[in-house]
Amino acid sequence: MMIIENMPLITLFSAPKPFTNPHVAMIQRNAIKSWTLLPDVEVILLGKEEGLVEAAQELGVKHIPHVECNTSGTPLISSMFKLARENSNSDLLCIVNTDMILMPDFLEAAKQVLESDGLPSKKRGFVFLSQRWDLDITQPLDFSGDWVNGLRFTVHSHGQLHRPAGSDFFLFPKSCYQDIPDFTIGRAGWDNWMIYKARREGWAVIDCTPSLMIVHQNHDYSHLPGGKIHYDHPDTNINIRLAGGHAHIRYTILDSTHCLVDGKLARPQMTSLRFTRKLELFLRAVFFFLPENVVENIARPKRWQKRIQKLLK
């Protein structure tokens, strides 16, 4: 009798940085190890960065080296999605940064979304995301014992909830995001475009911040030219152009259509920032012929301008 193994629910995929910087190598091992501890999940690491082959073997995950890159050798999002889709055994894909620690509530929230009666037609698609918690981690994590509650306590004591600009992971059905532009990974803009794309396609954009904790291990930007943050990198300008302009990279978690609270999907509570954002989107649709800055000045009173700009940085 042939035994057919159950397919994993989710395929996590990512393109790590080189494992040459000791701190970067440490936080990447922390992150990937946390992923491997999740049941019903498979992990794919993409790229040819130094130390990646050894790390994939050490952590027991799948490694695919032949990802397409830009002229600087940085992986392209489009190629990453294509390879993950072709090599995944799951119906759900999740791109996630390799500095993010995931815990069991990540998988629980994903299952709750799938089982929720409030989810619009699954055939239309959805994307699942959340805000992250920022935390300084300087040592390899000890994953023995009750490490989850220990980490949660540390995060609540010393961590900080990040603003709702962009996202460090996107979970979605394999049928979604099949026409990704050639964005460069690790540069600004592409993550905001993911939310824009979902809204444009009419997919549910589900903010799961109230239901899970994902932990971002803080790091510097010494891996980038000049050590400058990715907003200042020339590849970011290319990402913005590929996204269709600044209007398409201004989307954040504030543009979610649903939120997951206590295992159920609901509409997000209306706040002043969400109202301003909805007004801006409405005006863009009506006055599509006006320059972006004109619509922004109409939609956002000056007292909100600086506050929103901080969220988008």
Image (spheres, helix red, strand yellow):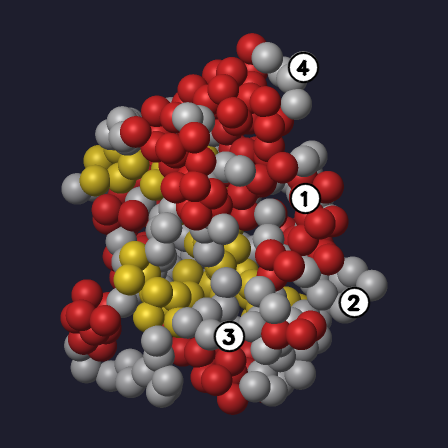
Tag 4 residue: 289
Q: Residue 180 sits in which quadrant?
A: top right
Q: Earlier in the sequence, mark 2 or mark 3?
A: 2
| Label 4 Cα neighbours within 10 Å, binned few <14 / some 14-19 / many ≥20 | few
**Residue drawn at point x = 56 percent, y = 86 percent:** 21
Q: Earlier in the sequence, mark 1 or mark 2?
A: 2
Q: Earlier in the sequence, mark 2 or mark 4?
A: 2
Q: Are marks 1 and 3 in contact (CB under 8 Å)?
A: no
Mark in front: 1 vs 4: 4
The circle on residue 72 is: 2
Q: Residue reaching furthest right? A: 71
Tag 1 residue: 240
Tell me the element at label 2: loop
Q: Amino acid at mark 1?
A: Ile
Tell me the element at label 1: helix
Label 1, label 2: how many angstroms apart (C-alpha)? 17 Å
Q: Residue 69 sits in which quadrant?
A: bottom right
| Number of marks | 4
Q: Position of residue 133 (x, y in %)?
A: 32, 61
**Residue drawn at point x = 30 percent, y = 29 percent:** 272
Tag 3 residue: 220
Mark in front: 1 vs 2: 1
| Label 2 Cα neighbours within 10 Å, binned few <14 / some 14-19 / many ≥20 | few
Question: Looking at this view, is 186 or 284 the one in front?
Answer: 284
